Image (cartoon, rainbow, N blue to C red):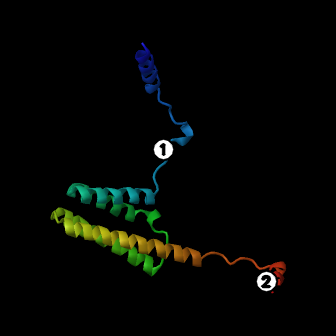
Amino acid sequence: MLFRSVAALVFVGHGQAVDPPKSEAKKPLTVMQRKLQHSQRILEGLAMNDFAKITTSAEGLMSCAQEASWRVLQTPKYELYSNDFVRHLEEMKTAAKNKNLDAASLAYVETTFTCVKCHQHIRDEKMGMAPALPTTDRLATSIR
């Protein structure tokens, strides 16, 4: 009898799901969030020897790179990183088409390294573009 009571409580509570508040409705993913999802899928494809997943995810990353929101800076270095990124993705797609896991893996590493270098460049540039702090007489005299 005790077992039936416990089982009944478990099943009664089990079927009731709480809907998330409407304010937490799914928002569209940012280009960075989609980029991370595609990158994770590429890694999964590499680990599982799934060349179709590698190709599809590389194409997804390439479409992210085509969006206007991708262009956060207008510097020669940023342009170089963006071009390198797309070139490595093309290499990855070719390797996946040829079912060459080593070449696809290398292209993935090169793509990731390009991302890291580009994000560092963006941080450096943004820090350099920060407005100078205003100097007040009180601040200047307290430093002396």
Task: Tell me if residue 57 comes above or below residue 7 in the rendering.
Answer: below
Quarter of the figure with the C terminus: bottom right
Name which quarter of the figure residue 89 lies in.
Answer: bottom left
Task: Tell me if residue 82 comes above or below residue 7 in the rendering.
Answer: below
Q: CA distance from mark 2 to mark 1?
A: 50 Å
SS type, badge 2: helix
- Can residue 113 be seen in this snapshot? yes
Q: Label 2 belongs to which residue?
A: 143
Task: Tell me if residue 50 comes above or below residue 71 in the rendering.
Answer: above
Residue at image location 15% in from the left, 65% down from the top: 98
Task: Tell me if residue 12 comes above or below residue 117 in the rendering.
Answer: above
**Left or right: residue 130 compared with residue 97:** right
**Left or right: residue 120 compared with residue 38:** right
Residue type at tag 2: Ile
Q: Which mark is residue 16?
A: none
Residue at image location 50% in from the left, 31% down from the top: 18
Between residues 7 and 116, which one lies in front from this camera angle?
Answer: 7
- Mark 2: few/some/many CA within 10 Å (<14, 14-19, 20+): few
Name which quarter of the figure residue 87 lies in.
Answer: bottom left
- Can residue 86 be seen in this snapshot? no
Mark 2 vs 1, N-terminal side: 1
Residue at image location 42% in from the left, 75% down from the top: 117
Image position, residue 19 (x, y; %): 50, 33
Mark 1 and mark 2 in contact (Cβ < 8 Å)? no
Q: Label 1 belongs to which residue?
A: 26
Residue type at tag 1: Lys
- Mark 1: few/some/many CA within 10 Å (<14, 14-19, 20+): few
Between residues 44 and 23, which one lies in front from this camera angle?
Answer: 44
**Left or right: residue 120 compared with residue 44:** right
